[in-house]
Image (cartoon, helix red, strand yellow):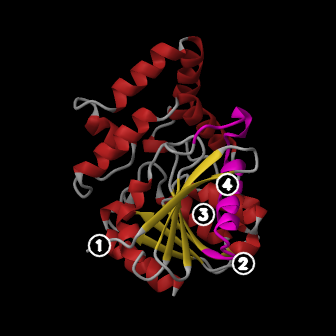
Amino acid sequence: MELFEKSSGIVKSFDGSSIYFESRGEGECLVFVYGIACLTNHWHHQIKYFSKNFRVITFDLRGHHQSNPITNPQNINIASAAKDIEVILDHLKIPKAHFIGHSFGAPVIFSAYDQFPEKFKSITLINGFAKNPIKGMFGLDVVEPFFHYFKKQFQESPVLFTQLWKWAVYNPVSMRAVALVGGFNIKLTHFKDIEVYARGVAQLDLNVFLSFFEDMMSFNGEKVLKKIDVPTLIISGEEDNVTPKSFQIEMASQIKGAELVTVPYGSHCTQLDFPDYINLKIEKFVR
């Protein structure tokens, strides 16, 4: 089935940074926000499905892929990424939209709601979190210490560590490990999607990744949760080892009237594991 014609462009955000966006279809607007170090490909099932009856907006997070250059490294953070969304909507003259976020896309959406709640019709969060998800990630408590070690080594030898980064995430030997770290269910997700993800991660500037990751560890959106007064759907994966369902259960308990759906066998990329089911849940919710 053919996709609706795509239009794309680049807007200058509040600080002059270039933000790339794509628009497909017509009707009520759905804005999809992917996670840190991800790509629009994480939404390819949803783009194809929803473009038939909705206007679908996707974009690259600042510093990711075609959203370059960043004018001020100090603005590589969640709040600035949220402001970029408002700039895109204003550029396209879209007054309100349904917002759908995956993983790190959740705190970006929370920050966006905090800044411009009047533009929200609804919120859907897939495998998301509202505060630091690092402690206990993969059932261990080693990710945060490793991050600080990795950052220190990178600052001391940026060229060497950039080369190691590219080699480590995009070669046949480590592809399975990259898939597991990225939260994929390798029994359900097509290998092509894992390969596209690995290639995207390898191309990402490490400074961008480290800045966003550090901001993510200090982010706490719990105050925003209590202010949300639009319909909210929270989707968790039963087998998500990156942001376990306890994060989604806690979020749902703090958002007035939130609907919580747990997908059996769902990984951290539930929208790729079970796209038909996720698409139907979202469609029913936003209608």
Q: Quadrant of residue 113?
A: bottom right
Q: Secondary structure at mark 4?
A: helix
Label 4 neighbour load within 10 Å: few <14, some 14-19, many 20+: many
Number of residues whose C-alpha sits closer than 10 Å to that of mark 3, classed few (under 14), some (14–19) or many (20 or more): few
Disc 4, disc 3: CB below 8 Å?
no
Instruction: Give whichever of discs 1 and 4 has the lower sequence position.
Output: 1
Q: Residue at x 34, y 24 (%)?
A: 167
Q: Which residues are magenta?
A: 68-97
Nearer to the camera, 199 or 36: 199
Quarter holding residue 118: bottom right
Determine the CA span between mark 2 and mark 4. 22 Å
Q: Is residue 186 visible?
A: no
Would residue 189 appear left or right of 208 to someone viewing this image?
A: left
Taking the spot 33% from the left edge, 45% from the top edge, the residue there is 196
Q: Which numbered tag is attached to residue 250?
A: 3
Question: Which residue in the structure is indicated by mark 1?
Answer: 2
- Tell me the CA gap for discs 1 and 3: 39 Å
Task: Tell me the mark number nearer the camera, choosing from 2 and 3.
Answer: 2
Q: Position of residue 195 (x, y in %)?
A: 29, 43
Between circles 2 and 1, the one closer to the viewer is 1
Nearer to me, 138 or 167: 167
